[in-house]
Image (tube, rainbow, N blue to C red):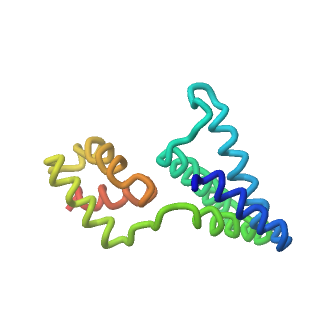
C-alpha cells in the first residue's frame, strides 16, 4: 500500500473519531502528495524515496514553526505544530539513534577518505544519500562536523 492510500485510510478513521489534529495533519500530507504528483515532470506518481522526502519536508517546516512559536510564547500554536509533527512522523521510517548515526557517519567518512573539515561537503553528499529517510540533514551535519573536527 502506497503512502496516499495509507493517508486516505487514516483520514477516514480520524474523521469518524472527530480527531481534529489528525485530520489537519493528514489533509496537509494529502495536499502535499497531490501537489507533488501534479507538478511538472512528476508523471502522476511518487516514488517511495520522494514520499519520504515529502514527509521530511513537512516535519521540518513544522519543527521550524514550533521553534518560532515557542520563542514567542505561543503555547496554543506550538501545541498544534507538535501534534502535527507526531502524526506525520508515524509515516516516516524509524529514525536512527545518535549512536547508530555516529557509527554510520564514521563509515561514510572512512569510505570517502575524509580527514578534515574541508572534506565536509563530500562526506555530506554521501551521507545524505546513504541515510536518506533515516535521519534529518541537521543531525547528519552535526555528527559529520563533530567527527571531522576531532
**Total marks placed:** 0
Please provide percent x and percent y for residue 20. Answer: 82, 67
Q: Is 134 located above or below residue 39 in the figure?
A: below
Viewport quadrant of the N terminus = bottom right
Q: Is 12 on the left or on the right of 42, as rendered?
A: right
Where is residue 150? Give x, y as percent: 20, 62
Residue at position x 78%, y 60% in the image: 24
Near-viewer residue (36 or 67):
36
Residue drawn where x is 64% and y is 59% of the image: 6
Q: Residue furthest front?
A: 1
Q: Position of residue 69 (x, y in %)?
A: 71, 63
The answer to whether residue 119 is above or below residue 76 is: above
Relative to 79, residue 128 above or below: above
* Quarter holding residue 42: top right
Q: Is residue 79 left or right of residue 132?
A: right
Residue 93 horizontal/vertical position (percent): 48, 63
Q: Residue at x 39, y 67 (%)?
A: 96
State the residue lying farthest toward the top: 40
Could you tell me which residue is drawn at 35 percent across and 47 percent down?
A: 129
Q: Does 12 sit left or right of 110 as displayed?
A: right
Amino acid at each position: 500500500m502506497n503512502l496516499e492510500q495509507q493517508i486516505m485510510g487514516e483520514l477516514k478513521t480520524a474523521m469518524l473519531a472527530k480527531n481534529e489534529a489528525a485530520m489537519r495533519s493528514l489533509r496537509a500530507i494529502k495536499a502535499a502528495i497531490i501537489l507533488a504528483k501534479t507538478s511538472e515532470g512528476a508523471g502522476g506518481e511518487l516514488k517511495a524515496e520522494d514520499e519520504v522526502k515529502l514527509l521530511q519536508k513537512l516535519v521540518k517546516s513544522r519543527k521550524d514553526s514550533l521553534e518560532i512559536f515557542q520563542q514567542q510564547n505561543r503555547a496554543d500554536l506550538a501545541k498544534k505544530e507538535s501534534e502535527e509533527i507526531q502524526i506525520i512522523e508515524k509515516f516516516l521510517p524509524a529514525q536512527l539513534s545518535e549512536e547508530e548515526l555516529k557509527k554510520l557517519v564514521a563509515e561514510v567518512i572512512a569510505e570517502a577518505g575524509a580527514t578534515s573539515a574541508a572534506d565536509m561537503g563530500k562526506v555530506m553528499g554521501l551521507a545524505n544519500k546513504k541515510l536518506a529517510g533515516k535521519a534529518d540533514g541537521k543531525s547528519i551535519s552535526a555528527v559529520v562536523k563533530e567527527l571531522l573536527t576531532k
